[in-house]
Amino acid sequence: MITVDRQAAKALHHQIYDACRTAIVEGRLRPGQRIPSSRVLAVELRVSRFPVLNAYAQLLAEGYLESRVGAGTIVSRSLPDQLTSSSRPGVRFAAIRSGPRPVALRPSCLNRLEKSPWLGGWGALGVGQVAVDQFPLPIWSNLVARHSRNMEAKSFRYGNQMGSEALRKTIAAYLRTARSVHCEAEQVMIVSGSQQALEISARVLFDPASSVWMEEPGYGLARHAFALTGCHLVPVPVDQEGLNVAAGIKRCRKARAAFVTPSHQFPMGVTMSAPRRFQLLEWAQHAGSWIIEDDYDSEYRYESLPIACLQGLDASARVIYIGTFSKVLFPSLRLGYVVMPSDLIGRFQAIRRAMDIGPPSFFQEVLADFIEEGHFARHIRRMRVLYRERRTALVDSISKELGSMVEVLGDEAGMHLAVNVPSRCSDLEIAERAARQNLWLWPLSPSYMAGLPRSGFILGFGSTAVTEIPRAVRQLRNLLVAK
Ligand SMILES: Cc1ncc(COP(=O)(O)O)c(C=O)c1O
């Protein structure tokens, strides 16, 4: 923040004094903040210590700084200039703010995020939340400690933009066996959650003129990521068999891509039927289009074995397959993956490099060992039992407390279910009131892009213990009845 000019007429100590004082008055140095020692500042400014000591002495004398034994010198917590309006911290910045401040036009769907209090909390019935208390933290911590002890020179360099080789190999092996994905490690890119996979895929595949089929209702964050490219989003209805491919063809045969969640449709929870899967693949092949498959929670199926993914049925390399560790481990890990057709690898790499060069390496290495040593598979097996219990408890409570007031939608899978409520109830209003009571209902209507949205809620059961569920459902009933 401070520079000095040796050629200037003003003495060095005066320049240092002025620069420090201005930084304090403008609020760049805050009350209580430590300032560098005179020795350190002198080295940084390449001057002797005398002018710095002189300047600090003046600032101390005037009350801008205070010395604290053992804590060095800090900015005074009762600034003399604070009382005069012309020099109050921040005033100059307020003046700057009054000029023109042009920013990019953003897609209108992003505006709603600021008014969505139900996204803000962690607790009963929250969507996208996992049983963090069940995570094998001691094992994870041991792996983290082991990796920090064993960091080598290469751990500090820029890594591979596709991600850690060890993790990509491990993920490829897992996806081949557990999800029937056709892939080699070379096709796997590690990303920071599936959200980044969506953004990179959109930048690789879409132009502003592209049309993209979106499930209706569907995953809002996919819409937001795609909308950033300026492409045209085409809502395609979802029914009991998943995306209605015939309706999509009718609306926009030549779409550049279709975004789907075939294993467990978000939010309605249906599984895409086999005939629809083949229809979708056939359309993509004939139209020269892409399919973006978001396979976000397919590990959790409670009635049957996990459903094989769409990518595994694709004979013409048209599917971009996306997965995440947010549901099977925990969302703050921000690790996911995208499996791309081989001919797109170079394009994905180029976009990735331009965006963030590559993923941070440390937790990738930890995760590779966590999977390799068998902890990942064990954790999923345990969570499958736990989430099944929680889902059953939620469905039972809904039927007991809400009876025919709502309809439960979705297969026995994943970590959420949806309920429809009578159309006179505004799900947005109820969700807003619920959030104030620490109940995190996701309203269903924002999942629709067009037409007449259905009123309802997406209810997560991942982080809600069986014993907490009846109370949360009674809270929901009270909110519905009060309408
Ligand atoms: C449909 C869908 N896809 C993906 C995710 C996970 O996103 P991320 O990997 O960015 O945390 C979620 C989380 O709730 C989701 O609902």
Image (spheres, rainbow, N blue to C red):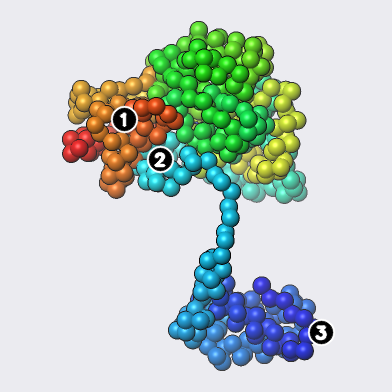
Q: Say what amino acid the circle numbered 3 marks.
A: Gln
In this picture, residue 25 sits left or right of residue 302: right
Q: Residue 389 appears at what percent x and percent y? A: 33, 26
Mark 3 nearby-residue class (10 Å; few <14, some 14–19, many ≥20) = few
Q: Is residue 72 visible?
A: no
Judge: label 2 CB < 8 Å from ligand 1: no
Identify the disc placed on residue 345. none
Q: Residue at the location (73% across, 31% down)?
A: 347
**Sequence order check, earlier mark of 3 and 2:** 3
Q: Are marks 2 and 1 in contact (CB under 8 Å)?
A: no
Of 11 and 414, nearer the camera is 11
Tag 1 secondary structure: loop
Query: Percent x, y for residue 72?
Result: 58, 80
Residue that carries the numbered disc 2 in the rendered image: 133
Identified at 42% across, 31% down, the residue is: 447
C-alpha gap between disc 3 and disc 2: 63 Å
Query: Which residue is painted at 56% across and 65% down in the image?
Result: 99
Q: Amino acid at mark 2?
A: Asp
Q: Which residue is mark 1?
A: 455
Q: How many labels sit on residues?
A: 3
Q: Residues within 10 Å of mark 2 (few under 14, many from 20)?
A: few
- Is disc 2 placed on a helix, strand or loop? helix
Question: Label 2, label 1: how many angstroms apart (C-alpha)?
Answer: 32 Å
Asked if residue 426 is positioned above or below residue 414 in the image, the reply reads below
Position in image of residue 294 (x %, y %): 54, 26
First in sequence, mark 2 or 1: give its number. Answer: 2
* Amino acid on which the number 1 mark rests in the picture: Ser
Between 71 and 283, the residue placed more toward the observer is 283
Quarter-of-image position of residue 363: top right
Would residue 123 be visible to someone looking at this image? yes
The answer to whether mark 3 is within 8 Å of ligand 1 is: no
Give the residue pinned by disc 3. Answer: 7
